[in-house]
Image (cartoon, rainbow, N blue to C red):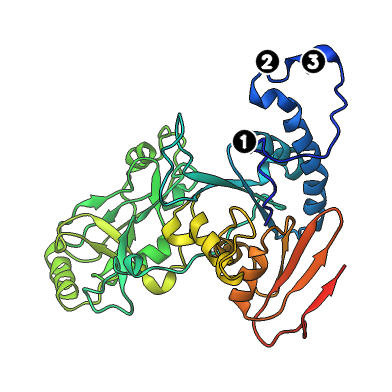
């Protein structure tokens, strides 16, 4: 986690800009307005951030990622700088955090309701951890046929038909007898042997050459000369009447095979996705305050610790940091807060673990390093290192 100064123009940077030309000094406040009081402040901020981000990149594991909190003042500059340091292919997202539940209306223009969390990883193939599933998500799963677990209806096809021509063929509908092909550009999701076994759950099927190269080429989006020869279809082993009778019994008694048919058997083909097979929810780049808290919540948390005194401006809510820990830090992982600020990161890890922390204080950065572990605590007693 990295929560640097936002460079709003109110900070008193100590870095010398070395601009003393009287003609330039005369412009301050006259030509470029208030921001011209120090026209190089953006450069100073980048000079302050660049070596620190380089160092943080060196400290990350290959499986690690960094979340950098920023507002609109330096968001664009930060993106360019991180693209250079981490690599543009390691940019994982710009998360919009809804920082306030009551946008201000006492300013001209558009009130700011969000802040940014810029996410970069060490490896381009980094994947975030999953979030817990909600009751609303699970409510979409049902078990109308008495199967092994609740399920929901999913698309039975997959993309890239032209490169998976062995998975482009016809399947005979057990209730209507029609031949079903994947839609244009798609193929069946599983190999033919698996699909044959699935369809045998409705009635007896077999493989048969349908001499349908033209139709398969149409699905693949290629010419008939380019289509793979000898791909057979999955069709009834017996006549339509016998096949439909068997399928009707399966429909009435259940459970239905993995591939089923909508509209009481007379509709299109769909695939079951079981609740037991799905993982948690993937995080998106929109985080609402209902889920991760807002700035007022963070301020109240900190005041409660200091007897009602406001000791730090605009602290992050601990729920926001805990969400980051949940998706980026495994058990026994190390968390580095490169700008300690109000210490919310340490607070969030303590809440997550209810164990101890290791605090490292540097004259360059005030760092908070914590370990996300499951009890018992391998670190033992709390320690401080300077």
Q: Residue at x 14, y 69 (%)?
A: 242
Badge 3, how many Cα within 10 Å: few under 14, some, many 20+?
Answer: few
- Residue 234: x, y in percent? 31, 58
Q: Quadrant of the C terminus?
A: bottom right
* Mark sitting earlier along the chain (2/3): 3
> Which residue is the extreme one toward the bottom?
376
Q: Secondary structure at mark 1?
A: loop
User: Is the residue under label 3 in contact with that under label 2 (CB below 8 Å)?
Assistant: no
Q: Exactly how many numbered labels are in the figure?
A: 3
Q: Tell me the quarter of the picture where residue 147 sits.
A: bottom left
- Residue 295: x, y in percent? 52, 55
Along the line of sight, the residue nearer the viewer: 93 or 43: 43
Label 1 – label 2 distance at C-alpha: 21 Å
Of labels 1 and 2, the one closer to you: 2
Q: Is residue 66 above or below residue 202?
A: above
- Residue 247: x, y in percent? 18, 69
The reply, left or right, for residue 374 in relation to residue 300 is: right
Q: From the image, tell me which residue sits under label 3.
A: 24
Q: From the image, tell me which residue sits under label 2.
A: 30
Label 2 – label 3 distance at C-alpha: 10 Å
Q: From the image, tell me which residue sits under label 1.
A: 73
Q: Residue at x 58, y 71 (%)?
A: 307
């Amino acid at each position: 986690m990295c929560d640097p100064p936002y460079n709003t123009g109110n900070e008193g940077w100590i870095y010398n800009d070395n601009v003393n030309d009287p003609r330039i000094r005369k412009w301050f406040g006259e030509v470029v307005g208030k921001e011209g009081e120090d026209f190089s402040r953006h450069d100073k901020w980048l000079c302050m951030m660049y070596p620190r981000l380089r160092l943080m990149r060196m400290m990350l594991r290959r499986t690690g990622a960094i979340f950098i909190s920023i507002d609109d003042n330096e968001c664009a500059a930060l993106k360019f700088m991180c693209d250079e340091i981490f690599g543009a292919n390691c940019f994982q997202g710009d998360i919009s955090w809804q920082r306030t539940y009551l946008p201000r209306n006492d300013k001209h223009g558009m009130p700011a309701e969000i802040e940014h969390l810029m996410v970069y990883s060490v490896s381009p193939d980094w994947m975030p951890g999953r979030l817990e599933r909600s009751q609303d998500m699970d409510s979409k799963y049902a078990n109308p046929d008495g199967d092994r677990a609740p399920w929901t209806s999913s698309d039975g096809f997959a993309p890239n038909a032209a490169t998976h021509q062995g998975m482009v063929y016809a399947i005979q509908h057990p209730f209507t007898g029609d031949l079903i092909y994947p839609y244009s550009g798609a193929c069946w999701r599983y190999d033919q042997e698996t699909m044959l076994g699935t369809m045998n759950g409705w009635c007896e099927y077999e493989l048969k050459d349908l001499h349908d190269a033209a139709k398969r080429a149409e699905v693949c989006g290629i010419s008939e000369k380019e289509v793979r020869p000898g791909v057979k279809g999955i069709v009834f082993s017996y006549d339509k009447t016998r096949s439909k009778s068997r399928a009707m019994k399966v429909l009435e008694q259940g459970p239905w095979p993995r591939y089923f048919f909508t509209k009481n058997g007379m509709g299109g083909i769909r695939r079951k996705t079981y609740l037991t097979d799905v993982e948690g929810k993937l995080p998106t780049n929109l985080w609402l305050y209902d889920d991760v808290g807002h700035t007022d919540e963070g301020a109240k948390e900190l005041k409660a610790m200091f007897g009602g005194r406001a000791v730090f401006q605009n602290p992050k809510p601990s729920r926001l940091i805990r969400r980051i820990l949940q998706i980026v830090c495994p058990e026994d992982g190390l968390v580095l807060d490169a700008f300690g600020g109000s210490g919310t990161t340490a607070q969030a890890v303590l809440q997550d673990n209810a164990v101890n922390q290791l605090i490292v204080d540097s004259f360059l950065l005030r760092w908070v390093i914590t370990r996300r572990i499951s009890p018992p605590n391998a670190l033992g007693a709390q320690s401080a290192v300077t």
